[in-house]
Image (cartoon, rainbow, N blue to C red):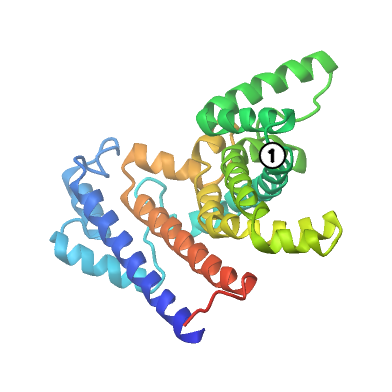
Amino acid sequence: MWRYTLTRLLQGIITIWFIATATFLAMHAVPGNPLAGDKAMTAEIQANLEAKYGLDKPVSQQYLIYMGNLMRGDLGISYTQKNREVNDIIREHFPVSATLGIIAIIFAALGGVLFGALTALYRNKWPDTVIMLMVIVGISVPSFVIAAFAQLALVRINGALGFSLLPVAGWGTVAHMIVPSLVLGLGTMAYLTRLMRSSMLEIVNSDYIRTANAKGLPATRIFTHHQLRNAILPVVTVLGPAIAAITTGGFVVELVFAIPGLGRYFVQAVQQLDYTVIMGTTVFFGAFLVLMVIAVDLLYGWIDPRVRLN
């Protein structure tokens, strides 16, 4: 177990190094000057700024400086936000994205397991048909479209009621989190529902399920102790990447609902060619995804005793 854990951690470090290197090369391949947006900049000021950020050095030397800073946990200083470090941006705004993502993944996981189990139990009946139709919509329709329709629906509902039932945008209270979390988690919930349904249908016809029925075990016990526990394993497998994807991938939802999360700063950094913020947030997102995948691999072995991690 320890050997497997150390191996996965080493693989994760190599993956993060590859992400950091690829991001660094991609940023330097993009045309444009990240300091060109400053107005009334003299040649002397331009040279001083380039020296401060190391842009006057060869690319190979810049890479070595960047990797050395990265190993110390220093992601650099933003080009566009004066005297503000990338670490501070992540520290201040990632908790907002994480809170939104955690609520969304709870909604997605609970809904996916529940609806997936219901579609398997009522296969080819009207609950199955209705839920699977909703799954198709959830997978097919982009999140920004759902977000726009959700905002429009809130405006109509609040107008009809004469008071604000739920805020249309913003952040700060539990009420602000409900609709954005539902919108963000809807696509993942649809995917988990389909995955749970397929897994449940495979297990229903297994030998141990028929044996449990033959022994006369209650249907509820068979469902909770045998069907649900084994059917949920594929869901757990994809839950780690899903957590990372939701937590770090709510860029559009954060923009639509005016949420001050890390996604908004990443989009702004791309628009403004803020290299350090782009590279820092990309490496941070990549490291978070790798960590979630490793955690799920270990959790999978804990849930299923048949799995042997060497």
Q: Nearer the viewer, residue 139 or 85?
A: 139
Q: Residue at x 52, y 68 (%)?
A: 297
Looking at this view, name the residue that lies furthest to the left.
58
**Callout 1, which amino acid?**
Thr
Image quadrant in which you'd find residue 134 = top right
Side (left or right) of 51 relative to 251: left
Badge 1: few (under 14), some or many (20 or more) residues near its Cα, within 10 Å?
A: many
* Residue 59 point in image, percent of width and height: 15, 59
* Residue 257 point in image, percent of width and height: 60, 32
Up the image or down, 296 lies above or below 28; here it is below
Up the image or down, 28 lies above or below 21; here it is above
Up the image or down, 20 lies above or below 198; here it is below
* Residue 69 point in image, percent of width and height: 33, 70
Side (left or right) of 73 relative to 164: left
Q: Nearer the viewer, residue 238 or 160?
A: 238
Residue tagged 1: 119
